[in-house]
Image (cartoon, rainbow, N blue to C red):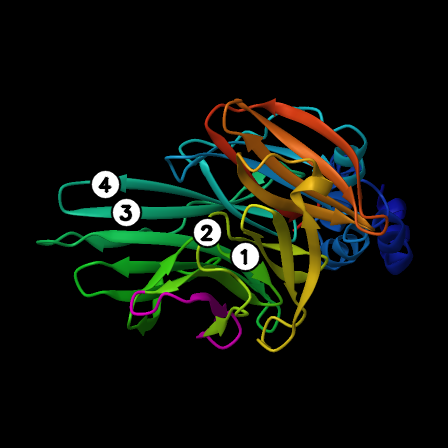
Amino acid sequence: MENSSAEILRDYDLILKIMSWLPIKSLMRFRCVSKTWNLLIFNPDLAKLHLKRSSINPQILLLFKKIEERQCFSAVLHSLLCLIQNPAPCSMLSCPNPYKYIFGSCNGLLSLHYSLSTNECEKHLVCFLNPATKTCSLPSPSLCLNYGIGVQYDINFGFGYDDKRNSYKVVAIVLDSSTQQTNVWVYCMGDVCWRLTLMTSPAFLTIDSNGYSLNATVNWLGRSSKESKLQIFSYDLENDTCRCLLVPELVPKNSEFTSMGVLNGCLCLSFDQGRTVFVVLALKEVRDETSWNRLVSVSYETLNISPYYDYLRTLCMWDDLLLLTYSQLWDDYDIIIIFNLKENKVERTQVYSKHSLSHIFSCHYIPSLI
């Protein structure tokens, strides 16, 4: 065994390269071979190399969220190819108790939330789960929001990676109704407390509750409490600053289903025009509000969608295929449309599964050893 360990250490770089191509399930079995193998598999160098390989074939995490609640009550993982070829229900992703709300995915880690209310305050805790390695972090310190006369809070979370400091961060934007102010709290993985980094006024009212992570920023769609125009509240994880990005004027004020997401490495905004055309705009550079361009503009007639749908939104893109989801007002199941952008036609429409009174959200997921 000593000779074997010495050989492994001698050929360290080569072994790491070979192991970086292996699926995580296999690596989790190999860690039982010896202490040396276990150290290799949980080596940060292998984790970074494996993440780089896995990024070529990302998966998608589908979240089913109740319409009247912000808590995500179920989630499933798919490979993009599997979802496109056969978007059938698969096994649910279970979260450790008491966490029930998944609000982000980054480099193979899922961020989970749990809250507890008392007469004096409400406490919010987060943790991090790696579904591939089946490991979960300890709970974070609690973010405690004290109640007072006429005080109500609206809190939204986002999760991202600060590559400048090699740090995973949770960002909470907290609207205090009594002061009409938005406070930004940040928790860095491993810290002993949350940090209050910003206090902004007027308050920012979110439309999409989850923050979308991209290029060391976390972004929410919404409006300032003093303006009716749509804006994107963008928090920079590297320097703890925020800015409000303007949304192009062509986005109608009366659009019922304006939503945000990330497609092909771009922050995207989707909306309908008069219940006749579905439009997706892409922000090529998240720190440059002049870099908007039109990614998709397709009629309901082409999509074969009735104007009486509910919550049409994008899920993901794979090459020239765009996946959309919606439900009819009179049905209790979700419908996935696979639309070919190059040929401007619907390739397939399928019922996904029954999740009564729910909406589908999605985020990219990359299996990793992080």
Q: Dot 1, how many residues are within 10 Å of its Cα: few (below 14), some (14-19), or many (20+)?
A: many
Q: Position of residue 156 (x, y in %)?
A: 39, 53
Identify the residue at image location x=16%, y=60%: 178
Q: Is residue 21 above or below residue 9?
A: above
> What amino acid is found at the position of numbered circle 4 in the picture?
Ser
Q: Is residue 369 visible?
A: no
Q: Is residue 89 visible?
A: yes
The numbered dot on residue 212 is 1
Q: Position of residue 272 (x, y in %)?
A: 56, 51
> What amino acid is found at the position of numbered circle 2 in the picture?
Asp
Q: Which residue is mark 4?
A: 117
12 on left or right of 105: right
* Dot 1 and dot 3 residues touching (CB under 8 Å): no
Q: Earlier in the sequence, mark 3 or mark 4?
A: 4
Q: Which residue is mark 2?
A: 208
User: How many marks overall?
Assistant: 4
